[in-house]
Amino acid sequence: MTRPGRPFRRFALLALLAGAAAFPARAATARLASDPLLPGGAPPFFAEGDAATRFHYIANTGPRFAGDRRGSLRVLYDTTLPTGRIGAPIGAVLSLDEDFRFGAVLTIRSAGFAADPNGFSQIAFGLWNARTTGLGRTLFPSDSFDLVEFDWFANVTAFGGPFLSPSIFGGSVGANAFDNFAFQSAEVALPLDVPLLCEGVYDAATRTLKVTVSRHVRGPRFDPVPGAEATVNLATIDPGFLVDTFGIAAYGEGWPSLRAEVDYDLLWVGTAPPPFSVVATPSLPASRTLVPVQ
């Protein structure tokens, strides 16, 4: 199959922008203090694949950090189940040509957690294209075109691990999304049963995506998890990605590579996500603080 030319991608971008014009904001946030899949939610989430088994709203979880509310979205990452995904429109189309950031506050539960040393599977959320990004991320060939993803591979194998390994897929250049793919890995174990602030920051000038993870300390403050940082060079991605959706994906593989329950309390894309802004703590520049927006 021939590589789509720049005129084709320009036409696709214009078409996506026209579709995104119906949504007024350029940033979107899901506070997850209520079930995101109920009708009338803001933003409106849609489900794909085996979402009914994967995603459950738990109303009685207590607030985990300053400004948080009761309730969490519990995601079951179980590779024996078919893939399930939920997403919501960003209200814009993001590409390699502009800065953006995305993130989540999540808690990986120790109850029932199991990562097979012979497997390699991830806890994942991120950005994708509602039209072109399929559910076959773990297949080969893969149909996960136009995908920007936070990935933590929990397995400890003969090659090491666990790995923080953000993955980026550009536009289609053939039948396999891995033909236009970039990633970078950092070997790091993330703590369980503690809220984690996971951020991805893309810099268009350097064509790099930097992903970091910080752990909750007290109040609104999160301190960096040592070693939990990975920067991906996207200079080789051509054609670039076009993403218009943010959300959470739980992938299936057909055998028990990973089982983990993860509670999400905040999910966003944008530079200053309401109802919070993520800022550096002045006295501790490496730390992050979730500041409620008045």
Image: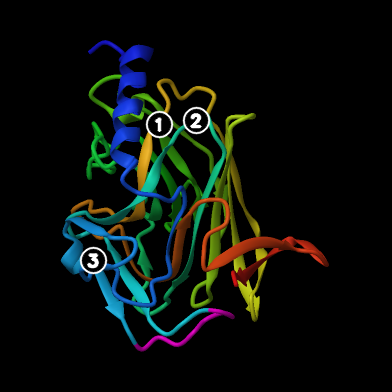
Separation of marks 2 and 3 at Cα, in angstroms: 31 Å
Main secondary structure along the magenta-highlighted residues: loop
Q: Residue furthest right?
A: 283
User: How far from the left and from the top, in percent, is residue 61?
Assistant: 40, 86
Is 234 left or right of 114, judged from the image as shown? right
Given the image, on which type of amino acid does mark 3 rest?
Answer: Arg
Element assignment for label 2: loop
As displayed, is residue 124 above or below residue 100?
Answer: below
First reached walking from the N terminus: tag 2 or tag 3: 3
Which residue is drawn at the image coordinates 31% and 81% (left, top)?
Answer: 58
- Residue 75 falls inside the magenta stretch: no
N-terminal of the pair, mark 1 or mark 3, is: 3
The local secondary structure at tag 3 comes to: helix
**Of the numbered discs in the image, which one, if any, rests on residue 54?**
3
Is residue 216 left or right of 161 when viewed as pictured? right
CA distance for labels 1 and 2: 7 Å
Q: Nearer the viewer, mark 2 or mark 3?
A: 2
Residue 96's disc is 2
Q: Nearer the viewer, residue 147 or 130?
A: 130
Residue 64 lies in magenta, yes or no?
A: yes
- Residue 19: x and y, percent? 28, 38
Rendered view: 35 above or below 167: below
Residue bearing mark 1? 241
Foreground: disc 1 or disc 3: 1
Do tag 1 and tag 3 residues touch (Cβ < 8 Å)? Answer: no
Going by the numbered disc 1, the residue's amino acid type is Phe
Count neighbours of disc 3 (C-alpha within 10 A) and say few if under 14, some if 14 to 19, many if 20 or more.
many
Q: Which residues are magenta?
A: 60-67
> Do the residues under discs 2 and 3 have CB atoms within 8 angstroms?
no
Q: Give me the residue at 31% from left, 13% from top.
A: 3
Q: Label 1 vs label 3: CA separation?
A: 27 Å
Query: Can see residue 69?
Result: yes
